Amino acid sequence: MPALDALRDRLRASHTLACGASVDSVYSHAAWAAALGGIRMPLLADFNPKGAVAASFGMFLAPAGITDRATVLIDADGVVRHASSVTPAGKRDMDALVKLCEELDASWSGALPAFEDGPGLSAGTELFVKDHCMFSRWSSYVRTNLGLEASLPMTNVTRDPAQGERLAAAGGKNQAPALLHDGTVLYESKDINAFLVERAADRW
Amino acid sequence: MIEVGAKAPPFKLQDHLGRTVDSEGLLGRRHVLLCFYPLDFTPT
């Protein structure tokens, strides 16, 4: 998936939303993507019922309980234009697949709207996290997966307790995770993540 | 495996950033390149 995510500009230009999909949960997806340095394209959790979407495309390998390494290109009218498998052990030619998207888009007669970027984060936005906290980890994964490591400072209040006091002074509570932005503080990881996505994710 | 020319089955799934991707909402807006892979933490 990182190899495909790296071709994001070409996919956006050809009005194509690329998605990864496996039977793993969203939490596994987030941790895996962050471990790889961050993945922005959607990684879909075909988790419950396990593999149901893959099965609907004939790409669930029931005996092994996994999906095939297989690719489907669906056009903007919802029609399948390409379907192929390289088997689980195989390797996809991502460049060739993106070329298929470019060819499809070049031949498309209708007008499709362009991708848009979010407005970005205000200067001074800061993420506070603590150790051994799954909520902190969940928000830090979103930061990495949106490519915000350079632009969104992350402060660990376990390792530097004085920073927790600074957080309490700003938002009223020394509780992490927290996101300080635009003079206000969000304390719930669900709200933090939704805010970061709204500001920094692709809009399709 | 689904055949070229077939109507794609609809899907609606959560992603790793907490978003919902609904294929119905993409009709008339996006082509979709759907890449199934066996499992996280395996080589891609």
Image (spheres, helix red, strand yellow):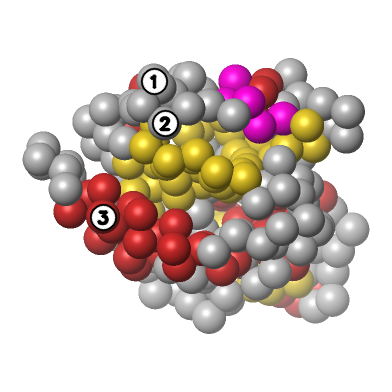
**Residue B5 in sight in this render:** yes
Residue A160 is situated, as x and y percent measured from the top left of the image, at 80, 78
**Which image quarter: residue A99?**
bottom left
Mark 2 or mark 1, which is nearer to you? 2
Identify the magenta region: A56-60
Chain to which mark 2 belongs = B
Q: Quadrant of the C terminus of chain A?
A: top left
- SS state under label 1: loop
| Disc 3 and disc 1 on one polypeptide chain | no
Verify CB contact (< 8 Å) between mark 3 and mark 1. no
Residue A170 is situated, as x and y percent measured from the top left of the image, at 56, 62
| Disc 2 and disc 3 on one polypeptide chain | no
Q: Which residue is mark 2?
A: B4
Q: Residue at x 57, y 75 (%)?
A: A149
Q: Residues within 10 Å of mark 2 (few under 14, many from 20)?
A: some
- SS state under label 2: loop
Q: Quadrant of the N terminus of chain A?
A: bottom right
Q: Amino acid at mark 1?
A: Lys
**Residue A194 in sight in this render:** no
